[in-house]
Every structure is written in structure tokens, then in C-alpha cells.
Amino acid sequence: QGPLVESGGGSVQSGGSLRLSCVVSDNTFRIAAMGWYRKRPGAAKQYELVARITSDGNTDYDDSVKGRFTVSRENAKNTLYLQMNNLKPEDTGVYYCNKWAAFPWAWGQGTHVDVSE
């Protein structure tokens, strides 16, 4: 098993919220730029980057989630978070965390998010 364990997914109605967590069992987490990725049903891209955060807290978002999602990290707990508000059906998918790097860690199992109308 790799160093990434995602949790917090679930089924919500459109407009609802979820908070995803990712615990990283690798101490280089503290210096790693991290990202939240997703795989959506039928999407061409295998891992779509939705949000990223540098080691010192600078963030960036895909236009599709800007203003609705917030990425944060707690280095003391080796944990990455994704607060997702005003969820839409098109946010449905499996969400993963990993380094935002050329050589990421082994992918975790992800956490499922299902948003219904």
C-alpha cells in the first residue's frame, strides 16, 4: 500500500457540501506541493487536477471549481483537505490526492463523491 489514504466522500444533493481528507504517511509531505485530482465518469483525462497547494500554502484551482472548493493542509498532521461547497452533479467522481510533481507517489484508493440533482 502506498502512502495516501483519502476519506470523506459520500452522496449529497446538488448544493451540498463535503470535506475530503488525505492522510499521507510520508514525512516529505511537509515540503511537497500537493494536489487533489478526480476521475469523472466518461471523462477523457485520467486524473484531472482540481486544486493544488504549495508547501507554503499558495493555492490554485481549476476554473470548474473556483469559488466553490478550498484546498488546505495541516503539515503537523501530514493531512491535506478539500472543502467542497455548492456541489454540482458534474463534480461526481472519485477524488484522489497526490503530489503535484512529475513523479507522484503510488495512487491511493480515492474517495467517491456522488452528487445528485
Image (tube, rainbow, N blue to C red):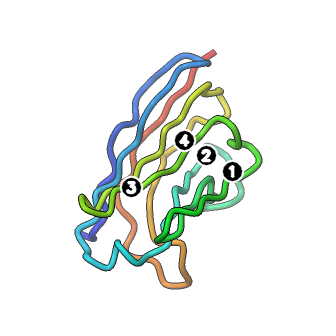
- The residue carrying mark 3 is 80
**First-in-chain label (4 vs 2):** 2
Residue at the spot 60% in from the left edge and 27% down from the top edge = 87
Marks 1/2 in contact by CB < 8 Å: the verdict is yes
> Gap in Å between the C-alphas at discs 3 and 4?
18 Å
Q: Nearer the viewer, residue 30 or 34?
A: 30
Q: Nearer the viewer, residue 34 or 75?
A: 75
Vertical placement of 95 versus 10: above or below? below
Residue type (three-letter) at the residue carrying disc 4: Gly
Residue at the spot 40% in from the left edge and 36% down from the top edge = 9
For label 4, the crowd category at 10 Å Cα-Cα, with few meaning under 14, some 14 to 19 and many 20 or more, is: many
Q: Which mark is drawn over residue 43? A: 1
> Gap in Å between the C-alphas at discs 4 and 2?
4 Å
Q: Which mark is drawn over residue 40? A: 2
Residue at the spot 40% in from the left edge and 29% down from the top edge = 10
Residue type (three-letter) at the residue carrying disc 2: Arg
- Label 3 vs label 2, nearer the camera: 3
**First-in-chain label (1 vs 3):** 1
- Label 3 vs label 4, nearer the camera: 3
Marks 4/2 in contact by CB < 8 Å: the verdict is yes
> Gap in Å between the C-alphas at discs 1 and 3?
25 Å
Residue type (three-letter) at the residue carrying disc 3: Leu
